[in-house]
Amino acid sequence: MMRTRNTRSPMQIRRFGLHNNNKENVSAVLRISRNCKTQLLKNYEIALHWLRIRRSAIRDERMSCVYHKEKAHLQMYESASEW
């Protein structure tokens, strides 16, 4: 069953008493939705922050690994040229 954009589920109607069209209940639902949205955005921003840190750490590890490979490669050629 498809619902239109602003309709509430039967559970929401029972839970918040929306079947009475009570303005206080409607505003409570809207306030909860706003609070949920705010909390979700905070969690999203925190998750993005940690992902950026992790991505940066991975990039640094890769650069470090490439540096060590190059250094080992150069040392190998230097030791070979000493012969």
Image (tube, grey):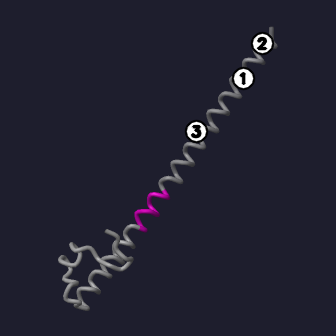
**Amino acid type assigned to the residue bearing label 2 in the image:** Ala
* Marks 1 and 2, how far apart at CA: 11 Å
Q: Say which residue label 2 marks.
A: 80
Q: Say which residue label 1 marks.
A: 73
Location of residue 62 (image quadrant): top right
Label 2 sits on a secondary structure element that is helix
Residue at the spot 71% in from the left edge and 28% down from the top edge: 70
The residue lying toward the viewer, choosing from 14 and 37, is 14
Query: What is the residue that sits farthest to the front in this orientation?
Result: 1
Label 3 sits on a secondary structure element that is helix
Residues shaded magenta = 41-49
The residue lying toward the viewer, choosing from 5 and 40, is 5
Percent x, y of residue 68:
65, 29
Query: How would you rate the neighbour count of disc 3 (Cα within 10 Å): few for under 14, some for 14-19, many for 20 or more?
Result: few
| Among the two numbered marks 3 and 1 on one chain, the one whose residue lies closer to the N terminus | 3
**Amino acid type assigned to the residue bearing label 3 in the image:** Glu
75 within the magenta span: no
Query: What is the residue that sits farthest to the top in this orientation?
Result: 83
Label 1 sits on a secondary structure element that is helix
30 to 83, vertically: above or below: below
Percent x, y of residue 53:
52, 52
Q: Say which residue label 3 marks.
A: 61
* Location of the C terminus (image quadrant): top right
**Amino acid type assigned to the residue bearing label 1 in the image:** His
